[in-house]
Image (cartoon, rainbow, N blue to C red):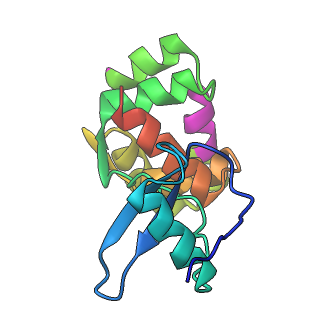
Amino acid sequence: MSSTYQFSIPENTNVDRADDDGMRASIPWGASGPENMDTVAGQKWLADGSPVPAAYVAPPEPVPETISARQFWQQMAVQGLIDEEEAVEALEGDLPNDIKHYINNTLPANERFAARMFFTATTFARTERAAADIKARFSLTDAAVDSFFIAAALL
């Protein structure tokens, strides 16, 4: 007995298939015509009620745990949070005025020394004080700070 299946899948589209053993295959749909054995298997697989999986979505890029001081200050300038001259001066130990103002006028007195030390470090960890201070000072979300670290790591 022969059956004909009709589906509305665009030509030259791949359909991902997983069998009972967890093996996956990408079936070229219509690439070689209806006689293509993978296309026939794909038609049967769909006809048996197997769903067409959603398109593959890559996992998010991992956030680096640390970046160098150069990467940190350069990314600050790239994003326009400080200017280029301030980035260079920060690498030489002179913090940008905006950061100094934040430390001296926003933080409690007993936290200021620690903040200055974090901002003059040679590396910056995503989970340490400077990242939290930058988040607070510039009203960034956690996702924005993660993006900042990802972009900085590429510099």
Viewer-closest of 61 and 42: 42
Q: State whether residue 142 is above or below residue 137.
A: below
- Residue furthest front in the image: 1
Residue extent of the magenta highlight? 92-102
Judging depth in this view, the residue of 74 and 98 nearest the camera is 74
Q: Is residue 94 visible?
A: no
Residue 80, image quadrant: top right
Q: Which of the image's four quarters has the N terminus?
A: bottom right
Regarding residue 155, the answer to whether it shows in the image is yes
| Position of residue 58 measured from the top left corner of the image (x, y, whole percent) | 47, 55
Whole-percent x, y for residue 125 in the image: 33, 53
Residue drawn at the location 66% of the way across and 50% of the way down: 140
In the rendered structure, does residue 33 fall within the stretch colored magenta? Answer: no
The residue under the point 47% across, 56% down is 60
Q: Which residue appears farthest toward the top when viewing the image?
A: 85
Relative horizontal placement of residue 109, taking residue 88 as reference (left or right): right
- The picture places residue 154, in percent across and down from the top left corner, at 36, 31
Picture mark count: 0
Quadrant position of residue 94:
top left
Q: Residue furthest left?
A: 122
Q: Quadrant of the C terminus?
A: top left
User: At 57% from the left edge and 42% from the top edge, which residue is drawn?
Assistant: 12
State the residue in front, 133 or 147: 147
Residue 36 x/y as whole percent: 43, 53
Using the image, determine if residue 51 lies above or below residue 24. Answer: below
Q: Residue at image x 40%, y 42%?
A: 119
Q: Is residue 94 magenta?
A: yes
